[in-house]
Amino acid sequence: MSKWESKKLIDVAYVIRGVTFDKGDVSDSPSEGLVPILRAGNIGNNLDTKNDLVYVPTHKVGKEQLLQVGDIAICMSSGSPDIVGKTSKLEEIWKGSVGAFCAIIRFNQNVIPNFGALYFQSRAFISWRKHQAEGANIKNIRKSDLESLMLPVPPLTEQERIVCILNEAEEMKRLRAQANNRTTDFIPALFDEMFGDPLKNLKQFQKKSLGDLIKVKSGNGLTSEAREIGPYPVYGGNGITGYHSEYMFDKPVLVIGRVGVYCGAVHISLPNSWVTDNALYVSSFSNDLDLTYLAWAIRFTNLNQYAGRAAQPLVSGSRIYPVEIVVPPKELQIEFATRVKEISSLEVDQSIAEQKLESLFQSLLHRAFEGEL
């Protein structure tokens, strides 16, 4: 246990509710007199202040609701228990706020914002948030429960020391991820080299609509509560979301995000996997296609642009079937897939190195909040 004094969050921070507004107040475009509003989808490893924003009149946003550098945005309510409790810190000046399903945590002089942000990555908080989410369909964290959250509060000098150590570990992770991203960039460059820009199709390959090439089905519902610990990966709207004791497919399948901010994202599953109803999967495809080529050809279509926006972004077979892709000779597709496999092998080695750094960071983080660092 931590040797430091523990305090309620309300004693060291303000918890500020997000902005409430009516559907008629919302604009999808920036304009004079409007304030940008972040939603749950903007809260990830970093706070995304540029994409998928809505805009509301200035008078709807209280002065205290405008985000300040060092503030932490937290998702308080969502249909997905994996999203409830996610946090991101605002790193630079940005005039905007968060929506009603989110809140702002603003630390007082007793806690350095960077130290507070680290706590929300800790095992203790992740465990707390999983137990706090409630509701049959919509998962919630109550403001009063968040304010009652107990967290260790060491002296400011100790907070600074811990932040310094963990910042060095974060920088190592960043540099490793940067190297990985460079390798990932090889595949789009390879696609362009072999097939050219699919929109221009200067190499004059045959073009066909996805409806003539593939059939998609929705995955099977599987909430986090229903999952039983096991070795089989579970794919949601944007890749692996957890693991389960059962699987749907013994062979790799092509998975397309169906709902939410990541709808249209494309992944090839690992063997022995489950696909949830947050995603579509390709149940069959033309013999003229290689699976790896198909995945990358669909990625270049940016399926997210075809999503319906009535409540939240959503794609379906009827929306994506008219989309066209180029269909080069299959031997070229197979050559592309072979070279992708070689690049992916290098990515696996880099991913293992990245996982080791992440494990080191999590160990340091755990020790920090146990008072052992």
Image (tube, grey):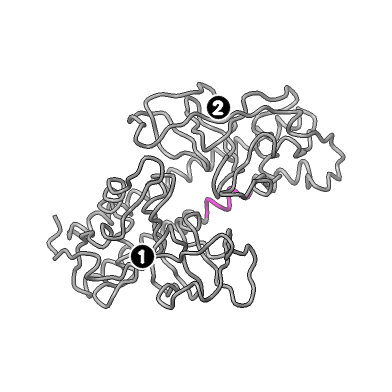
At a point 65% along the width and 46% down the height, the residue shown is 307
Whole-percent x, y for residue 256 in the image = 59, 37
Instruction: Write down the region rendered in magenta.
Output: 179-185
In the picture, the quarter occupied by the C terminus is bottom left
Whole-percent x, y for residue 359 in the image = 33, 48
How packed is label 2: few (under 14 Cα within 10 Å), some, or many (20 or more)? some
Quadrant position of residue 146 = bottom left
Question: Residue type at mark 1?
Answer: Asn
The numbered mark, 2 or 1, whose residue comes first in the sequence reads 1
Question: Residue type at mark 2?
Answer: Pro
| Residue in the foreground of this view, choosing between 24 and 331 | 24
How packed is label 1: few (under 14 Cα within 10 Å), some, or many (20 or more)? some
| Residue in the foreground of this view, choosing between 339 and 161 | 161
Task: Say which mark, if any, is on residue 167.
Answer: 1
Count of picture labels: 2
Q: Which residue is mark 2?
A: 252
At a point 18% along the width and 57% down the height, the residue shown is 370
Identify the secondary structure beneath mark 1. helix
- State how far apart marks 2 and 1 are (Cα): 38 Å
